[in-house]
Image (cartoon, rainbow, N blue to C red):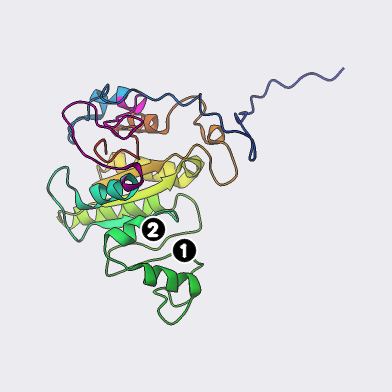
Amino acid sequence: MAQRSRLHVPRPPARPGEKPDFSYVKITPAGAVPRPDTKVPAREVESLGRDLVRVLDDDARAVGPWNPHLEPQDLQVALRYMMLTRVLDDRMQPGDMLFPSYRNQGLFIVRGLSLVDLMCQCLSNTRDMCRGRQMPIMYHWGAGNIFSISGNLATQFPQAVGWAMAAAIKGEDRIAAAWIGEGASAEADFHHGMTFASVYQAPVILNIVNNQWAISTFQGFAGGEGRTFAEYGPGYGIPGIRVDSNDFLAV
């Protein structure tokens, strides 16, 4: 009689075409978790990797003293605006470098690239900023300090960390920011970037955007079944903060 395998294989709560079930996602009530100071040590924010920083409730109404009057559809662009302009610490520098994933068109729009230019890249016409050398939606914009989008997963993390290290070596007051999806956190480049960012204290913001489902696999296959992705941070000595990315004020 064949022995039954004891290997654990993550089981998606729903398959494509089935009714989604997000009951496994633990969401902290809006206003229950305070937003930390930007310079707080990693050891003091470990709980924020498990909880969820939220200001707005499920009807996009602020909890507490906030009065934003924002609609849900405005929040995604507002989030990126907050990230890019460094509103939180009033140190906006136009030279900050962005390393986007292929779902971050909002970064280009906020920095001033027109929708027509984005469309021209997809069509590979004479206004294509990539001159026909990139696949559609893999934009780059040198004048806007936005690095080339890569078809390979997680390359943005070590690239952003390396750029930030170079800025620090030159004594510049500039930062880098990178975005990947939750599935890409299973790639080796993710861990390489985290290690270098921690060891050399690179001025970089590393974002994992978790939409609960990577290109073809459930988030559990990237380690999201047993913990949140923000909990990776403290293991590297980096503050990891789990934030509702649809909540402008929380970000």
Within 10 Å of disc 2 (Cα), the crowding (few <14, some 14-19, many 20+) is some
The x and y percentages for residue 32 are 27, 21
Q: Relative to residue 71, is residue 24 drawn left or right? A: right
Instruction: Report helix, strand or loop for mark 2.
Output: helix
Q: Is residue 161 something that shows in the picture?
A: no
In this picture, is 222 found above or below 184? above
Magenta residues, dominant SS class: loop
**Residue 137, numbered circle:** 1
Q: Hey, which quadrant is residue 59 in on the image?
A: top left
Q: CA distance from mark 1 to mark 2?
A: 8 Å
Residue at left offset 44%, top offset 78%: 131
Instruction: Report helix, strand or loop for mark 1.
Output: loop
Comparing 154 with 35, the one in front is: 35
Residue at left offset 36%, top offset 46%: 73
User: Outermost residue, bottom direction?
Assistant: 126
To which residue does mark 2 refer?
105
The x and y percentages for residue 58 are 36, 30
Q: Hey, which quadrant is residue 172 in on the image?
A: bottom left
Q: Which residues are magenta?
A: 48-74
Q: Amino acid at mark 1?
A: Ile
N-terminal of the pair, mark 1 or mark 2, is 2
Q: Is residue 54 something that shows in the picture?
A: yes
The N terminus - image quarter: top right
CB under 8 Å between callouts 1 and 2? yes
Comparing 127 with 55, the one in front is: 55
- Tell whether position 46 is magenta: no
Q: Relative to residue 35, is residue 246 drawn left or right? A: right
